Image (tube, rainbow, N blue to C red):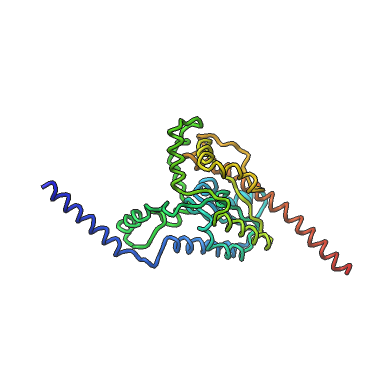
Amino acid sequence: MHLECWFWAGVFFSALIVIAFLKLDPSVTPTDEFVVFNGARLDVLDEHPARYKVVLLGDSRLKYATLSDDDLGRLAADLNADIAFLRIVQNQAQFDDFVSFLDRILAIEPDLVLLQESLFSRQRDEDVDLRTLQKMVIWSLVDGRGTWNPHGVNQAELQFATPCLGSGAQSPAADMNPAQLHAFVEEVHDRGTREWDGPNALAARAFVEVAGQRGIRVLPLELPATDAYSRILETAFADHAETAGTTLRATWKCPRRFQPEDYCDLMHLDADARTMFSEWLTRRAVDQLQAVEPRARMASVNDAEGHRRD
């Protein structure tokens, strides 16, 4: 009787999996949804009447560290600056996730593009999303529409939701024991590598060069993390850490030292810290944009005077 129950349970769950696959629409992939959703947001930015435009690209750390586009715009307005912000994120992002948007970003000609520093070196492991199949099946059974979804949430949630579940960093102390450190390092290794000469690194640097030729400044943005997380990365990618300072120049880094209680977990800021980081980021952007503009005006005046003399 016991074996018979297990047999019929197996038949039942197998049938559910078959039904799930039949309901899937193979013409719609997670990448399609990501590109369509954020392509529409880029269209909105293109039509925005703001004097300045700033684009931010990164992973979930960027989402948790910054307020929404509109809130960043309001912070800028409080500083008497008219700036439209657009932040696009992807979980565990590598630069390749944003390649579909690069031409569109260049066409919009934003005044500033900020790239999370990890985009200049992260090379995600091809097997990092082995759970996608499980998520896809469960999502299809529950949702019923049969379209893909990148991480079990809709695109709006992926871009904007910040369900901070922790009350302070749920992480080992900076003096974590060797076993703890080894476990975290292995987990990081399973997700991918950091390569200054890998495909994503080369693509990111090429984008910086092309954007610069069009007068668009692209800068790396360093995001806060707990001391424990920093130690894990330094241990996991020792060679990478040693050359980071010389490879990435002009990196924006918030001078504020956030405490463990400012984080939800190892690396994601909570709501209060998010506001503080966003205030610093907005002020830095305003200073950057207003400093560049007078130089541009002066160059224009000098050029005009040169033409008159000719």
Q: Is 136 positioned to the left or the right of 99 in the image?
A: left
Q: Is residue 173 above or below residue 113?
A: above
Q: Is residue 270 visible?
A: no
Quarter in which the C terminus is drawn = bottom right
Q: Which quarter of the figure has residue 20?
A: bottom left
Percent coordinates x, y for residue 130 in the rendering: 38, 53
Percent coordinates x, y for residue 71 in the rendering: 56, 50
Viewer-proximal residue among 49 and 117? 117
Q: Is residue 159 above or below residue 239?
A: below
Q: How many marks?
A: 0
Percent coordinates x, y for residue 107 in the rendering: 61, 66
Viewer-proximal residue among 29 and 80? 29
Q: Is residue 176 visible?
A: yes
Percent coordinates x, y for residue 72 in the rendering: 58, 50
Which residue is depicted at the point 45% across and 48% down? 191
Q: Is 81 positioned to the left or the right of 148 in the image?
A: right
Q: Is 70 positioned to the left or the right of 52 in the image?
A: left
- In the displayed orientation, state which residue is furthest to the bottom: 310
Which residue is depicted at the point 64% across and 55% down? 218
Q: Is residue 38 above or below residue 173?
A: below
